[in-house]
Image (cartoon, rainbow, N blue to C red):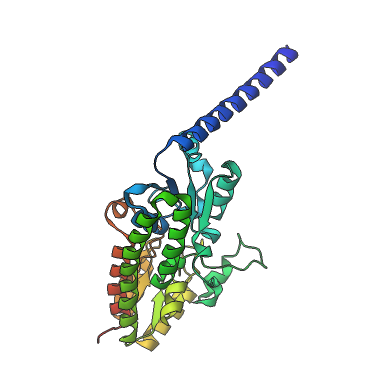
Amino acid sequence: MKKFLKFVSVFLLFSVFVSLSSCQSVSLKDREKKEKPYIVCTVFPQYDFVRNITGDKATVELLIPPGAETHAFGLKDLSVKKIDELYNADLFVCAGGEIDEQLEKELKKMLPQSVRFAELTQFAGELLLESEAENGEDSKKDEVHRSESEEDYDGHVWTSPKRACAIVAKLTDEICETDPNNQAFYRENAREYLSQLEELDRLLEDTVSGAKFRTLIFADRFPFRYLCHDYGIEADAAFEGCSTAVEPSLMTLNRLYEKAMDLRLPAILYTETGDRSYAENLAQKIGGKALLLHSCHEISAKEFQTATYLSMQRQNIETLKVALGSGE
């Protein structure tokens, strides 16, 4: 009986191996047959960049669905069918850093070496430390998942239109290498899209140059290190960029309140992933407004249908005009 059970176990293991090998071989054949390059993006900003560059010449997919927690997302969240489809990918565009680090590692181990990988953090110039922002005491407590010697770089490089321009230029090169037959088309699309990003940059420069205030207060996380650095804005926040904490302490909220009162700021900010009630409570106390500044990192299903990086950044500029007192 034991010999029989051992034989059945070995047979089942062999069957699974053959099945997986068969799936991979079929997928690799499909790679050779498909007419369009298949480009997979982990989060929304690079998905929007890539689809503007490629137009209808490529199949572009957002891997992490709207509303999902990007930091915790991994192969465990994908169906067997979806994993098999990923073997057909030509290019994976990841955010880089903590944002999708684990998912990228899992994909690189699983997929054939012919699949190319690109990271936004490699294209955005000098990386900035999360800890360089003037954050509250709560951010110091959120170090469970980090080693003491690890340098925590902010991965939200796209929040600055200046960095977005550099990213799009580099992404265009990557896409042209992936599909050289259509590179003239891609570069023309990129030129048109870059002109819109440059207009965003000019609008932001004008907003900041005409500002009455130069400080932003976030009763929330702080994924805007690059935006503030590149446009000369100071910021204070309850938590660092990728903090897993969700409830600021009373001490932190009191410190943010006192700073907002001292500077006579007209608004308290929150992000799309945070609890807006903290910003609303502080805003009520200072006689100001609670406003959303969207990092474009995590989007809702509704936003995925209608919003773009450009539209969200234009709304951000309107928010900053109020928060910075521009034009007053």
Q: Quadrant of residue 221?
A: bottom left
Place of residue 265 in the rendered image (x, y in percent of width and height, measured from the top left): 34, 83
Place of residue 160 in the rendered image (x, y in percent of width and height, measured from the top left): 41, 71
Point 34% across, 65% down: residue: 191
The answer to whether residue 237 is above or below residue 185 is: below
The answer to whether residue 154 is above or below residue 305 is: below
Check the image and name the residue furthest to the left.
328
Q: Give left or right: position of 8 versus 236.
A: right
Nearest to the observer: residue 272 or residue 177: 177
The answer to whether residue 113 is above or below residue 277 is: above
Nearest to the observer: residue 192 or residue 10: 192
The answer to whether residue 267 is above or below residue 87 is: below
Q: Is residue 254 visible?
A: no
Place of residue 322 in the rendered image (x, y in percent of width and height, measured from the top left): 28, 78
Place of residue 256 in the rendered image (x, y in percent of width and height, measured from the top left): 43, 79
Quadrant of the drawing holding the C terminus: bottom left
Quadrant of the drawing holding the N terminus: top right
Q: Give left or right: position of 260 versus 111.
A: left
Point 55% across, 27% down: residue: 22
